[in-house]
Amino acid sequence: MSHDPAGDDQHGHHDHSHLEGMELKVRTLESLLVEKGYVDPGALDEIVETYETRVGPRNGARVVARAWRDPAYLERLRQDATSAIAELGFTGRQGEHMRVVENTPEIHNMVVCTLCSCYPWSVLGLPPVWYKSAPYRSRAVSEPEAVLAEFGVTLPEGKTIRVWDSTAEMRYLVLPERPAGTEGWSEERLADLVTRDSMIGTGLARAAGEVS
């Protein structure tokens, strides 16, 4: 298995210290609201969980499912991912400059942001905590096979891993391989196979037998 750091040096990063400052302010406000009893921390956790793992990633799942079913849409996605994604109504902050990278039998793609936490919110929702962590941001580039193994992903021998480094200028969406046995499936049913992690590259799409 080889490692091709495809996006490691292609783009520069902007200074995101202002985002870190904003995050600190948000956390301070959250603590004050919880302390005064205005907000239930359990409810906050549930909201974050919903947008991180369900509502947000469902947008990206629809993009992937459309690409699996519609060759013309797939080609538009390859040519101009930002515009093709906007066709489905998914636009907004951190989704302005998108590129889709396709997994194939020979190549597995994985996305990281090594210097901050650039993430395509419009199609994936809130970034998971681990995506923003220093260990993931460093190890995804230096030892991607080990990181994938920790996520439970074992790739066939000889498959190349390409690691793409997101920046303020470019964010990536992984197009996972379409699972076997899904010929003739509706777009909605196909979307059920697409997970957030499969669109980051730290996971694979669900097998056909994993959904009803």
Image (tube, helix red, strand yellow):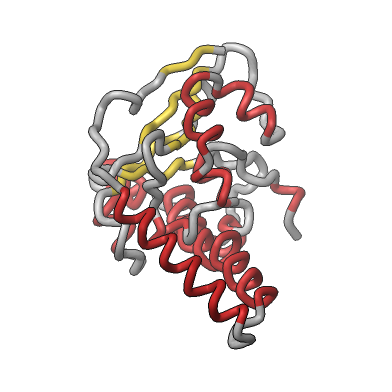
Look at 30% across and 55% down and name the residue there. Answer: 18
Where is residue 116 shown, x and y percent of the image? 38, 42
- Identify which residue is drawn at 30% across, 41% down: 167
Picture quarter containing residue 153? Answer: top right
Is 19 placed above or below 164 here? below
Residue 88 vs residue 52: left or right?
left
Question: Could you say which is closer to the camera, residue 14 or residue 76?
Answer: 14
Horizontal and vertical percent position of residue 131: 52, 44
Q: Nearer the viewer, residue 23 or 35?
A: 35
Percent coordinates x, y for residue 151 in the rendering: 67, 36
From the viewer's perspective, is 124 left or right of 10? right
Residue for point 62% across, 79% down:
35
Where 68 sits versus 162, above or below?
below
Task: Tell me if residue 133 comes above or below residue 60 in the rendering.
Answer: above
Name the residue located 53 percent from the left edge and 41 percent from the top edge. 133
Quadrant in which the C terminus appears: bottom right
Pick the quarter of the image with the N terminus: top right
Instruction: Say left or right for 142 vs 53.
Output: left
Q: Is residue 161 left or right of residue 20?
A: right
**How many circles with numbers are drawn on the protein?**
0
